């Protein structure tokens, strides 16, 4: 009887330890560093609708912007240069226009044409990404690892050198 009780307690303890380890290693989906980036599907500029998970396996820089935002305008050439320099190493830069923050629906396409943006552009027409990613100002940039984990969150303007330092360990 005493031996059966000991074995039962030992079995319960093993199950508890395994359960704790299993649940601690599962990452939560969300919008903060250490979490798995929440997937979304949105229409794109000059492409069919796509989703964030289509790019999983690459290191992703996910940049949220609006056409009236001067820092957004200023950082766009650096983002395009970074994409050109690191795309063969597994970097993908995706941009999301926050259409609900735009003055008119033509502002984003005009901005894309004016700056000759060569990066993929999602259109957040209904504010879905703005809400899920808690966008409170622009630009906002996420760096997402190959496994979909958010590695860095940057609120404000980004530059080539700063992003390069953050992505190189991930490539």
Image: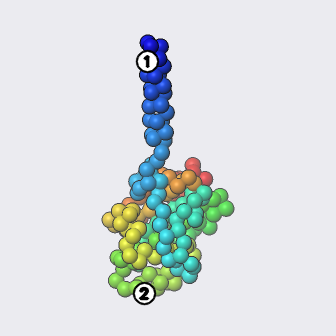
* Nearer-the-camera pick, 48 or 140: 48
- Rendered image quadrant of residue 23: top left
Secondary structure under tag 1 reads helix
| Residue at the extreme top of the image, as rendered | 2
Q: At which x and y percent is residue 13?
A: 45, 26
Question: Which tag is nearer the camera, tag 2 or tag 1?
Answer: 1
**Which residue is label 2 attached to?**
106
Please give the name of the residue rendered at 57% of the width and 54% of the height, measured from the top-left corner.
146
The residue shown at (56%, 78%) is 48
Please rate how many residues cluster around mark 1, counting C-alpha atoms within 10 Å: few if below 14, some from 14 to 19, many from 20: few
Residue at numbered disc 1: 5
Q: Is residue 1 visible?
A: yes
Pick whichever, 134 or 153, lies toward us: 134
Query: In this view of the protein, can residue 71 be seen by the observer?
Result: no
The residue sitting at the right extreme is 88
Residue 21 position, x and y percent, is 48, 35
Q: Quadrant of the N terminus?
A: top left
CA distance for labels 2 and 1: 73 Å
């Amino acid at each position: 009887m005493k031996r059966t009780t000991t074995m039962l307690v030992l079995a319960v303890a093993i199950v508890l330890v395994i359960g704790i380890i299993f649940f601690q290693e599962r990452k939560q989906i969300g919008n903060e560093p250490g979490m798995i980036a929440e997937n979304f599907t949105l229409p794109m500029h000059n492409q069919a609708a796509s989703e964030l998970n289509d790019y999983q396996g690459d290191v992703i820089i996910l940049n949220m912007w609006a056409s009236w935002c001067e820092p957004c305008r200023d950082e766009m050439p650096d983002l395009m240069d970074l994409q050109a320099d690191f795309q063969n190493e597994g970097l993908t830069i995706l941009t999301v226009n926050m259409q609900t923050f735009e003055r008119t629906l033509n502002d984003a396409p005009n901005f894309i044409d004016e700056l000759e943006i060569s990066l993929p552009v999602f259109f957040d027409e209904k504010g879905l990404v703005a809400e899920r990613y808690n966008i409170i100002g622009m630009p906002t940039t996420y760096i997402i690892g190959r496994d979909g984990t958010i590695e860095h969150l940057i609120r404000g303007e980004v530059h080539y050198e700063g992003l390069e330092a953050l992505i190189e360990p991930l490539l």
